[in-house]
Amino acid sequence: MNTFFGGIHQNGYVVSDLDAAIGYWTTVVGVGPFYRLDHAPLDYFSYQGEPSTPDLDIALANSGDLQIELIQQLNDAPSPWRSFALAKGGPAPCVRLDADVRLRPQEARRVGFRSNV
C-alpha cells in the first residue's frame, strides 16, 4: 500500500438524479441522513487548464468513518464529472484520500494530482 495517500475517507458518485440517489442510499443501503447543498459554490474552478463554471448539487452522508458524496452536475460546463458521465454513461466513482501534495510534489504529479499551493 502506498502510505503517501493515507486511508480512504470518502467515496463520491456522480449521479444523474440526486433525489433518486439519496432515496436509494437511505432506503436500500441504509446510509443517511444526507446533507444537501444545491448549486454548490466553486470559486476559481478550472478543468484541463481552462476556467469552467459547473453547476453542482451535492449531498453528503457518513457511514462510520466513510463519507459518501453524491454529485449531480446541472449544466454542460466542462468538468471531470461531466466527462466521466459522457464517457461511461453511468455513476462515476471518486475517492478522497488524505495527501499533502506539498511534501511530495513529484509523486503527486505522477498520479495526476494538481495543486495551486
Image (cartoon, rainbow, N blue to C red):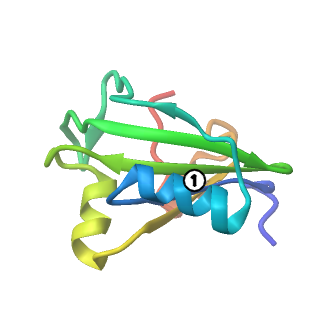
Q: Amino acid at mark 1?
A: Ala
Compare residues 111 and 28 and report the one nearer the observer. Answer: 28
Q: Which percent across, then down, holds residue 97?
A: 68, 52
Instruction: Give the residue drawn at x 54%, y 56%.
Output: 23
Q: Which percent across, then down, holds residue 22?
A: 53, 52
Note whether 81 is above or below 105 in the view shown.
below
Q: Which percent across, then down, holds residue 93?
A: 50, 66
In the visual, does 104 lie left or right of 14? right
Note whether 112 is above or below 101 in the view shown.
below
Q: Can the viewer see residue 109 in this picture?
A: no
Q: Residues within 10 Å of mark 1 (few under 14, many from 20)?
A: some
Q: Can the viewer see residue 38 in this picture?
A: yes
Disc 1 target residue: 108
Disc 1, SS: helix
Q: Which percent across, then down, holds residue 16?
A: 32, 60
Instruction: Give the residue drawn at x 35%, y 74%.
Output: 90
In the visual, does 63 lie left or right of 90? right
